[in-house]
Image (cartoon, rainbow, N blue to C red):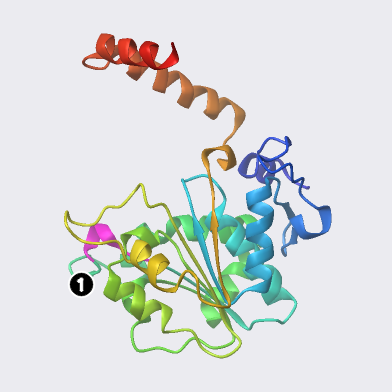
């Protein structure tokens, strides 16, 4: 795999998964215009396979597991080979309540703060001038979820990021945008819902309603799939240990942990 940047993004242990499955080389590779990307964990390989073969894919799990990054990679790969004509990337602008009229500037200025992670993935996999040309020509579109209403997205690979922050109404609206020769990838982390208290996550609702339909796949990621730079992993673990040690009632928590381990 070329590039230290991708190695950092997709740094995952090479040990076998709980089912003893090792990634198969051919199905784990994704060729993008800028670099070749390798899915390393069994769950990542299952996810990449689903992205290539299925019309509607749900990628569920914690941040850092490559859910959106791998979806963008597969989308660009399919687009470069002519299987789809365009790529549409979206996420709910929860911080703005999907009402962006109060923010200054034109549309791109307004939505960019909420869509930067999607741009980061694009520029990581494709030369900057090519990304800019595709954005200007409409071959790649990055837009907040609110701007999907009333559209039918045909011949496209459509990705909805941070889907746990959609409402049930928004999710139904998004899923029904699917047109001919298109596929959708919906990614999210159900442990990181930022909706108002009492509001059901559209992602959780969709999984219960459509998750078992034909031509739909649900791939769940676990903490073992989290991709971080080696030093960052150590830093996170050190902070977690410090917080456990110095948090209020730490002595009580230690006693509980010790009792569980006995």
In the image, residue 168 sits, relative to residue 29, either above or below, namely: below
Residue 87: image location, x then y, percent: 56, 75
Residue range of the region highlighted in magenta in the rendering: 91-97
**Which residue is disc 1 drawn over?**
101
Near-viewer residue (258 or 229):
258
Picture quadrant where residue 207 is located: bottom left
Q: Looking at the image, which residue is at 27% across and 60% down?
A: 94
Residue 196: image location, x then y, percent: 18, 56
Asked which secondary structure carries label 1, the reply is loop
Q: Looking at the image, which residue is at 56% across and 70% down?
A: 132
Q: Is residue 48 left or right of residue 252?
A: right
Q: Is residue 40 magenta?
A: no
Q: Is residue 70 left or right of residue 242?
A: right
The C terminus, quarter of image: top left
Q: Looking at the image, which residue is at 36% across and 61% down?
A: 204
Q: Is residue 108 left or right of residue 128?
A: left
Q: Is residue 232 left or right of residue 254?
A: right
Picture quadrant where residue 127 is located: bottom right
Please rate how many residues cluster around mark 1, counting C-alpha atoms within 10 Å: few if below 14, some from 14 to 19, many from 20.
few
Near-viewer residue (199 or 123):
199
Q: How many marks?
A: 1
Residue 1: image location, x then y, percent: 78, 47
Near-viewer residue (147 or 22):
22
Q: Looking at the image, which residue is at 57% across and 56% down?
A: 69
Q: Is residue 94 magenta?
A: yes
């Amino acid at each position: 795999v070329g590039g230290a940047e991708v190695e950092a993004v997709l740094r995952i242990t090479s040990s076998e998964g709980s089912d003893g499955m090792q990634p198969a080389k051919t199905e784990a590779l994704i060729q993008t215009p800028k670099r070749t990307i390798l899915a390393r964990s069994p769950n990542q390989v299952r996810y990449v396979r689903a992205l290539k073969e299925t019309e509607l894919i749900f990628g569920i799990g914690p941040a850092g597991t490559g859910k959106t990054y791998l979806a963008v990679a597969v989308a660009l790969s399919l687009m470069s080979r002519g299987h789809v004509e365009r790529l549409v990337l979206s996420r709910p602008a929860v911080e703005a309540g999907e009402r962006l009229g109060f923010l200054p500037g034109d549309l791109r200025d307004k939505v960019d703060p909420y869509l930067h992670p999607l741009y980061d993935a694009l520029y990581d996999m494709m030369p900057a001038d090519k990304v800019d040309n595709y954005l200007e020509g409409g071959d790649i579109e990055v837009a907040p979820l609110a701007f999907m209403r009333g559209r039918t997205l045909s011949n496209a690979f459509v990705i909805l990021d941070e889907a746990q922050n959609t409402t049930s109404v928004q999710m139904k609206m998004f899923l029904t945008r699917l047109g001919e020769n298109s596929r959708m990838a919906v990614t999210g982390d159900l442990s990181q819902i930022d909706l108002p208290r009492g509001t059901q996550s559209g992602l959780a609702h969709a999984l219960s309603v459509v998750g078992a339909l034909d031509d739909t796949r649900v791939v769940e990621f676990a903490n073992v799939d989290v991709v971080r730079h080696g030093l960052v992993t150590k830093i996170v673990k050190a902070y977690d240990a410090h917080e456990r040690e110095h948090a209020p009632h730490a002595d009580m928590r230690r006693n509980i942990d010790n009792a569980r381990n006995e």
